[in-house]
């Protein structure tokens, strides 16, 4: 029943440390059978048991650490090129990350879908900012690069955003948001507000994907019109309502 605490059916929970005011520490080891050597398929021996401490999801309202006592194996054949290796279990934690797999997926959703800051999530888990940010990048990159993430929009929009003010002189740094207007979903953000980056982004999509865009919305800027003229020549261009109303208001004459 203790395995329910970590949500991993293939591990043994060997101990639970409650050292207040520090995090709760749950000690585990895998139930993996002795493997064959991946190099020569010969017999192996246990070399040592390194300990890896991973940040896990909170338990009982407290920050929690999973203390994984790994197995390091050694090939018994002196002629084998694969002398030693450490067991891996992606279900427990991804290599080179300091969070458990379930915590890594959770923090990615909290930051990406729920819009929470990395610092806020790190504070809840009782760990540093870089631990959470590294996991968000690792798990989030695979989601961003998934070709099925974007789908097939019918209406595509471009709009500029003041992304940041950089340096002691607070120089404006702009970005361009690429939006699925029909679904109201942000597809990507590219640097600058010129035509170059949006054109490069659209060039990375297939010809069939670009042909499926029937409507192109823009904010009356010349560079974005150039993007649509060049990359989506068959799409009907329309101005978004906000900028149309703003332009109309500047032309009103009050008597």
Image (tube, grey):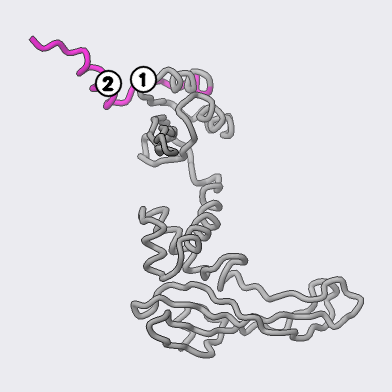
Residue 240 within the segment the image draws in magenta: yes
Q: How would you rate the neighbour count of disc 2 (Cα within 10 Å): few for under 14, some for 14-19, many for 20 or more?
A: few
- Single out the residue that lies furthest toward the right: 79
Q: Position of residue 217 (x, y in %)?
A: 38, 26
**Which quarter of the rendering shows the C terminus?**
top left
Q: Position of residue 27 (x, y in %)?
A: 53, 85
- Single out the residue that lies furthest toward the left: 255
- The disc at residue 220 is 1
| Circles 1, 2 touching at the beta carbon (< 8 Å) | yes
Q: In the figure, 23 relative to 156: above or below?
A: below
Query: Residue drawn at (36%, 36%), measured in percent from left and top?
Result: 182
Compare residues 102 and 165 and report the one nearer the observer. Answer: 165
Q: How would you rate the neighbour count of disc 1 (Cα within 10 Å): few for under 14, some for 14-19, many for 20 or more?
A: some
- The disc at residue 118 is none
Query: Residue drawn at (46%, 88%), measured in percent from left and top?
Result: 17
Residue 180 makes an appearance in the image: no
Name the residue tied to disc 2.
Answer: 244
- Single out the residue that lies furthest toward the front: 168
Q: Report how far apart the C-alphas of labels 1 and 2 lie in the structure.
A: 8 Å
Examine the image and state in which quarter residue 32 appears: bottom right
Residue 117 within the segment the image draws in magenta: no
Examine the image and state in which quarter residue 178 appears: top left
Query: Residue drawn at (62%, 66%), measured in percent from left and top?
Result: 95
Q: Which residues are magenta?
A: 231-255
């Amino acid at each position: 029943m203790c395995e329910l605490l970590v949500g991993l059916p293939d591990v043994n929970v060997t101990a639970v440390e409650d050292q207040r005011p520090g995090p709760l520490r749950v000690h585990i080891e895998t139930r993996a059978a002795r493997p064959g050597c991946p190099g020569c398929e010969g017999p192996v021996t246990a070399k040592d048991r390194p300990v890896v401490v991973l940040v896990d999801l909170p338990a009982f309202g407290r920050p929690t650490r999973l203390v994984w006592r790994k197995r390091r194996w050694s090939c018994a054949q002196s002629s084998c090129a694969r002398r030693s290796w450490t067991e891996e279990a992606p279900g427990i934690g991804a290599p080179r990350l300091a969070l458990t797999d379930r915590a890594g997926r959770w923090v990615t959703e909290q930051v990406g879908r729920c819009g929470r800051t990395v610092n806020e999530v790190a504070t809840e888990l009782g760990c540093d900012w870089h631990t959470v940010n590294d996991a968000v990048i690792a798990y989030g990159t695979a989601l961003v690069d998934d070709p099925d993430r974007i789908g097939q929009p019918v209406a595509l929009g471009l709009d500029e955003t003041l992304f940041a003010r950089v340096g002691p002189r607070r120089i404006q740094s702009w970005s361009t948001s690429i939006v699925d207007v029909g679904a109201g979903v942000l597809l990507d953000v590219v640097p600058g507000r010129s035509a170059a980056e949006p054109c490069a982004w659209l060039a990375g999509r297939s010809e069939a994907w670009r042909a499926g865009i029937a409507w192109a919305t823009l904010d009356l800027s010349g560079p974005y019109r150039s993007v649509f003229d060049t990359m989506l020549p068959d799409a009907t261009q329309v101005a978004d309502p906000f900028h149309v109303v703003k332009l109309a208001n500047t032309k009103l004459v009050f008597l």
